[in-house]
Image (cartoon, helix red, strand yellow):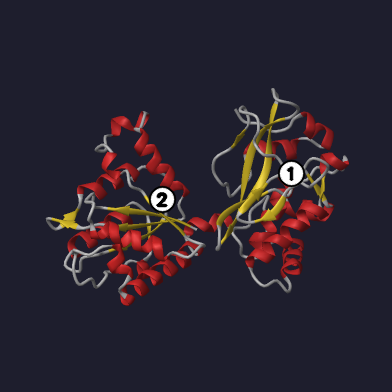
Amino acid sequence: MKILALSGSLRAASINSAVLRALRTLAPASIDVCLFTALGELPLYNPDLESAPPDVAIQLRKAVASADALVIASPEYAHGVTGTIKNVLDWLVAFEGFAYKPVAVLNATPRAHHADAALRETLITMSATLIEPASITLPLPSANIGEADLLAMPEIASLLTEVLAEIESAVNQSPAMKPYLDSSLYIDSQHPAIVAQAAKLAEGCAGEEEIAKRCFEFVRDEIKHSWDYRLNPVTCKASEVLIHGTGYCYAKSHLLAALLRANGIPTGLCYQRLTIDGDQPPYCLHGLNAVYLQQYGWYRIDVRGNKPGVEADFCPPLEKLAFPIVNPLEQDLPGIRAEPLPAVVKALTENPTVEQVYDHLPDIQ
């Protein structure tokens, strides 16, 4: 899990920054706490800059989008939040990657209740998901202490450890995860056949990682790739893939998503844009999955099906996909999608044979 930490103070000796560094030190291996240290380089927000945002604003937004949660620690200036943290939030107001993001607020100074309340109000107005159990005021004896002092205080270390646990719990229950757990037209995880197969695969498993591995290996090895085996019919819905035992990479990714969602494990769809043959056009999309594992966060896997020269595996946190990006014109498409791309659905629903699908493989420009 990735947590982005933002300090509202630019002082080198800031107690708020020290609290965030202590939080990073206390984080277990499953949680990566990353401090964004370039807030002082962020220019004052100006809507006129939205057409070409400065590099530091782009970096900030990318960091926010890739984080599972945010934690903010900010001092109080004149009964209000600092200009630093207000400017950060101004840059995120219209950024869709911030909406519904789980956020915890740490107050390092018990007397700074005005800024704490104002910051919470702003975050709620911006549609953040405030993690109340993790948003606490720390009983610090002084503002003139550093990271080592904080870590040497058992009470503070315990509170910060509890904050991390509450953030992890909130991320797993966040509204942002709901689309990756929902049943839908093509990822029909509530179909009786899907529910039965998901339960069968989960039987006897010790935890989510073992369930994910079993589901991955089942779809990779037991569901035949339509083009490799020249098998009809063309499938798109997860239940169709399971019933007929065949599917293109996209359809197989729909089935894996459905099986994992049926087991309560958030799963999305990812795509690569690859050359079809050699190192030149034409190109096509390749479908794979991202599964959210509590110990590692989002982890990409590829159930296309192995064959000579193609070997994908489930070995978190290392990725082992069927097709690594080796051509500068190829790319991993950004983002994790809850639903299939329209181009993929079109290719699988408007072409009645596997040969016709191959002649009209989906692509985006």
Type of amino acid under label 2: Ala
Provide residue 151's location: percent of width, then percent of height: 33, 69
Compared with residue 192, is residue 245 higher up or lower down, i.e. above or below? above
Specify the farthest residue to the top: 280
Q: Which residue is mark 1?
A: 249
Provide residue 296's location: percent of width, then percent of height: 56, 58
The quadrant in which residue 353 appears is: top right
Q: Give whichever of discs 1 and 2 has the lower sequence position.
A: 2
Compared with residue 58, is residue 12 higher up or lower down, i.e. above or below? below
Q: Is residue 248 left or right of residue 152?
A: right
Residue 142 disc label: none
How many labels sit on residues? 2
Crowding around mark 2 (Cα neighbors within 10 Å: few <14, some 14 to 19, many 20+) is: some
Provide residue 66's location: percent of width, then percent of height: 47, 48
Provide residue 312's location: percent of width, then percent of height: 73, 48
At x 32%, y 43%, the residue is 38
Residues at badges 1 and 2 in contact (C-beta under 8 Å)?
A: no
At x 57%, y 46%, the residue is 337
Q: Is residue 146 left or right of residue 92?
A: left
Type of amino acid under label 1: Cys
Specify the farthest residue to the bottom: 155
Q: Secondary structure at mark 1?
A: helix
Residue 99 disc label: 2
